[in-house]
Image: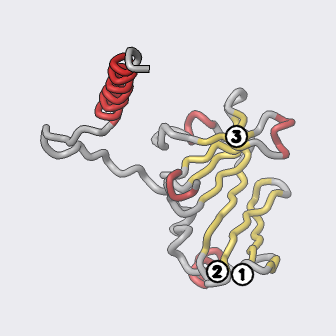
């Protein structure tokens, strides 16, 4: 047992030293080169000057007029308006506190995804839903507060959704 003791000591020192080396390399280094560069804020979007997350439901009704119908639920009301795009309605979601939280605007099938997505955040999430069978996905730009139900392959957009701008850190 006595002859293994020096080897065991060297081995333990090696393991502790290696761990300390990698721990020191993984720690963030403080920024000593001056202030961090700031980026320009991304544009947020509104529908007819209705800003989801800040515009009250009664202001929404004042701007859009009386809805053709209302759908009540336990967490708010959905106001339904004619859109002028076929049978697809414009829907506006108002929560129980009276704040407009979501607007779904139907768009003509000739709307261009590449044109509508210009100027939006480069970070987008793609969600799949019932229209995926037809090639449509929901491309969500959290920082802008806008999502496009689009078929990027065909460069078409079916709907544009407006919601309060957010970050992925606060959503997930």
Q: Earlier in the sequence, mark 3 or mark 2?
A: 2
Measured in 3D between alpha carbons, the distance from the residue under mark 3 to the one under mark 1, in whole angstroms, is 29 Å
Instruction: Specify few, some or many for label 1: CA neighbours under 10 Å numbering under 14, 14-19, or 20 or more.
Output: few
Q: Which mark is residue 61?
A: 2
Relative depth, front residue between 4 and 17: 4
Q: Secondary structure at mark 2?
A: helix
- Residue with the mark numbered 1: 66
Instruction: Specify few, some or many for label 2: CA neighbours under 10 Å numbering under 14, 14-19, or 20 or more.
Output: few
Tell me what residue is drawn at x 81 percent, y 38 percent: 132
Measured in 3D between alpha carbons, the distance from the residue under mark 1 to the one under mark 2, in whole angstroms, is 6 Å
Residue 65 figure quarter: bottom right
Residue 96, image x and y in percent?
A: 67, 83
Residue 144, image x and y in percent?
A: 49, 52
Work out which quarter of the rendered image holds the C terminus and state it. bottom right
Relative depth, front residue between 11 and 122: 11
Q: Earlier in the sequence, mark 1 or mark 2?
A: 2
Tell me what residue is drawn at x 23 percent, y 42 percent: 37
Q: Secondary structure at mark 3?
A: strand
Q: Which of pointers 3 and 2 indicates the residue nearer the eye?
A: 3
Measured in 3D between alpha carbons, the distance from the residue under mark 3 to the one under mark 2, in whole angstroms, is 28 Å
- Residue with the mark numbered 3: 150
Above or below for 138 versus 9: below
Q: Earlier in the sequence, mark 3 or mark 1?
A: 1
Number of numbered discs overlaid on the protein picture: 3
């Amino acid at each position: 047992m006595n002859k293994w003791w020096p080897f065991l000591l060297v081995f333990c020192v090696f393991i502790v030293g290696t761990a300390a080396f990698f721990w020191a390399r993984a720690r963030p280094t403080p920024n000593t080169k001056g202030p961090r560069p700031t980026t320009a804020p991304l544009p947020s979007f509104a529908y007819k000057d209705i800003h989801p997350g800040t515009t009250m439901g009664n202001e929404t009704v004042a701007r859009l007029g009386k809805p053709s119908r209302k759908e009540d639920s336990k967490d708010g009301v959905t106001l339904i308006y004619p859109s002028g795009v076929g049978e697809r309605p414009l829907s506006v979601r108002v929560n129980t506190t009276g704040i407009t939280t979501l607007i779904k605007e139907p768009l003509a099938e000739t709307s261009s995804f590449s044109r509508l997505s210009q100027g939006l955040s480069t970070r987008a999430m793609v969600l799949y839903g019932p229209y995926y069978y037809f090639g449509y996905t929901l491309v969500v730009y959290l920082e802008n507060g806008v999502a496009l139900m689009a078929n990027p392959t065909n460069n078409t957009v079916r709907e544009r959704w407006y919601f309060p701008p957010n970050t992925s850190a606060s959503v997930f």
